[in-house]
Amino acid sequence: MFTLKKSVALVVGLVALLGIIPFVAKAVRTDVSRDFPVYNNHGKPDLTVDPKRFVNQMEIIDRLFDASSCEIAEGSVGGTGYRRLLRFDTVLINGGDGDLVVGSPTDPNNPYHSVFIYSPCHMHYHIIGFSNYQLLNLDRTIAAQGHKQAFCLEDLLKYTNDNKSSGYVCAFQGITTGWADWYFKQLSGQWIDITGVPEGDYIVHVEINAAHTFDEGANRYSNVIETTIHIPDPRNKVTIDNSPAATD
Ligand SMILES: [Zn+2]
């Protein structure tokens, strides 16, 4: 049997024998997902969206909303009945060398107290106007207004190899340096309502920290992400998503 102890001893032995320190290749990937370079932003956060996940999770589905749907109240769909939704993942990476600290939504002494709003769809507090989701024509005029998706910011994914989460959650919000929050496509509002949009090529436009609520220092990483998409004829059938609403 090849035990862990033996294998460690073997590696140590080999290192001693060859007189070298094992070299672990670390690829720097600008296309992400994972292993994201954090830079010296003088202790400030710098938020950006994982471009890979944004593009590869994108899909068009139909989903039913009735008058009692929280999405009607929140304005993330344009009406009741079946709506055609272009949905995607928004992973918010903090690539600056400082944590984004937002704090408790219910603490009246929190300097960000006024930017929180309670979301009936998500059942927790969000930051007002955090992101802006739009569908643009190729000439950059607006094809579908989309909406301002609000977020509860917390640590969900680790994007560097070496640092621990400071433990941000919806009740005390923030994103640790080198970590990311993840709003996946099944979450309420992670979409642009494209009902009635004619067949053609469009630009999907997402801006984060859209209201400039948070200081991002040098802000070297872009707050805007875009990709082009072909939207099929609205009469064509797409997958109907009848699954229960996902919570985060
Ligand atoms: Zn939420």
Image (spheres, helix red, strand yellow):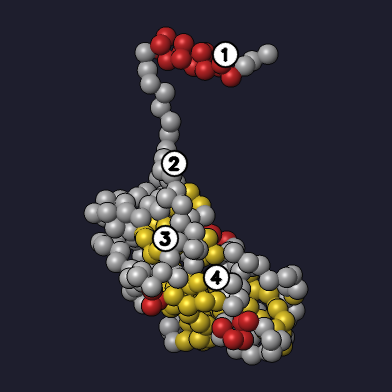
Could you give the CA–CA distance between mark 1 and mark 3, rounded to whole angstroms? 42 Å
Helix, strand or loop status at disc 3? strand
Helix, strand or loop status at disc 4? strand
Asked if disc 4 is less than 8 Å from ligand 1, the answer is yes
Could you give the CA–CA distance between mark 4 and mark 3, rounded to whole angstroms? 14 Å
Q: Is residue 150 above or below residue 177?
A: below
Could you give the CA–CA distance between mark 4 and mark 2, rounded to whole angstroms? 30 Å
Helix, strand or loop status at disc 1? helix
Q: Residues within 10 Å of mark 3 (few under 14, many from 20)?
A: many
User: Does residue 24 appear in this view?
Assistant: yes
Q: Is residue 81 above or below residue 45?
A: below
Q: Is residue 31 left or right of residue 71?
A: left
Q: Residues within 10 Å of mark 1 (few under 14, many from 20)?
A: few
- As rendered, which of 99 and 62 lies closer to the eye? 99
Q: Nearer the viewer, mark 4 or mark 3?
A: 4
Classify the position of the C terminus by image quarter.
Answer: bottom right
Q: Earlier in the sequence, mark 2 or mark 1?
A: 1
Q: Amino acid at mark 2?
A: Asn
Q: Which residue appears at 44% of the width and 70% of the height? A: 105
Q: Amino acid at mark 4?
A: His
Q: Is residue 17 left or right of residue 73?
A: left
x then y, percent, for residue 90: 51, 65
